[in-house]
Image (spheres, coloured by chain):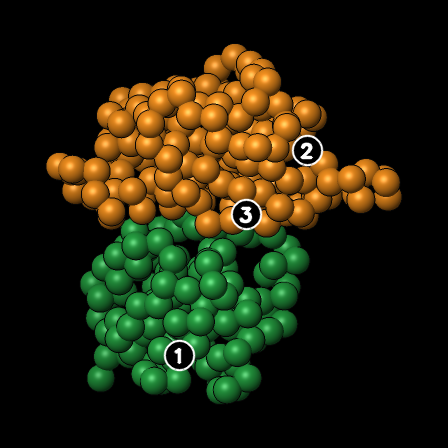
Amino acid sequence: MKVEYISPFVEASITVFEMLLSTSPERGQLSARPQVFTSQQVNIVCGITGDVEGQVIYGMSIVAADKIASQMLGQSIVTFDQLAASAIAELGNMVSGNAMTLLSNQGYTCDITPPTIVKGTNVKISTLDIPALVIPMKIKDVGDLEINVSLKEREAKKAVA
Amino acid sequence: MAKRILITDDALFMRVTLKNILTQHGYEVVGEAQNGAEAVKLYNELKPDLVTMDITMPEMDGIEALKEIKAGDGGANVVMCTAMGQKNMVVEAIQAGAKDFIVKPFQPERVIEAVEKVLAA
């Protein structure tokens, strides 16, 4: 997988977190995984279709998810209910949507599918055979966010290029 | 009389947030649609002064819904409100008759500014 697919997601997550939580996340060491796999408690799965296709998964702990949702809603979360889940899903939607804008500036036109929340650790998510690159992000006072990017260029696009 | 607004977004969080922003500024939220098909149906029933429209939604997406609403009522005021700021999306929406385009995440002031401008025109 090309690294140029990664930076839009990093940039987008920084922009979105700065706006939503008034804090700037710190980027950690990139690592690779043979498959889309998550070891986090709360995961937002976004499908990507278009010139590049695959999946992006944003994983975090339940504590981090509660903190983020609380800030987005402007009230503290007692139970992780439908509204909190919706806020977290929307976070994934915003980061992916903003990343799509940046990807399109690089000449890749893509679309996102509505986000899905998957709760539970050690879940293997995709049947697609695309290796994943994982970017850990540290968010001050919130916790860690793990961005799993698993994308490949569509065959037809490759042929034209 | 308060201007009547229809909100369209598949995310509960966004509907709640937009509703709060709009009602705090004196607008009346007359309906909330969860997808494009619902937005078209509610538009025809409620005839709101303005519609906010998400793009990525299940059932019918926002661009499709925008086109259907404009086909039924050429004067409809639709403001796109979406996480996707891609040029081709913006161009397609504006060509289809959208009056403005707000990229999420947004500040409340940006929403109010867009709504005021469209309703004043």
Query: Mark 3 is on which residue type?
Result: Ile
Circle 1 is placed at which residue position? B41
User: Which residue type does callout 2 highlight?
Assistant: Lys
Which numbered marker is on residue A112?
3
The residue that appears at 58% across and 43% down in the rendered structure is A48
Q: Drawn colour of chain B?
A: green
The span from disc 2 to disc 1 (Cα, nearest Å) is 38 Å
Which structural element holds mark 3?
strand
Residue that label 2 marks: A152
At horizontal 22% and vertical 71% (from top left) the residue drawn is B26
Chain under callout 3: A
Real-space Cα separation, disc 1 to disc 3, in angstroms: 25 Å
Residue A51, by quadrant, is top right
Residue A26: give x, y in percent of width and height: 44, 20
- Label 1 crowd (10 A; few <14 / some 14-19 / many >=20): some
Do marks 1 and 3 share a chain?
A: no
Name the side, left or right, on which B102 lies relative to B4.
Answer: right
**Residue beneath the point at 60% across and 37% down:** A54
Chain of the residue under label 1:
B
Q: Colour of chain A?
A: orange
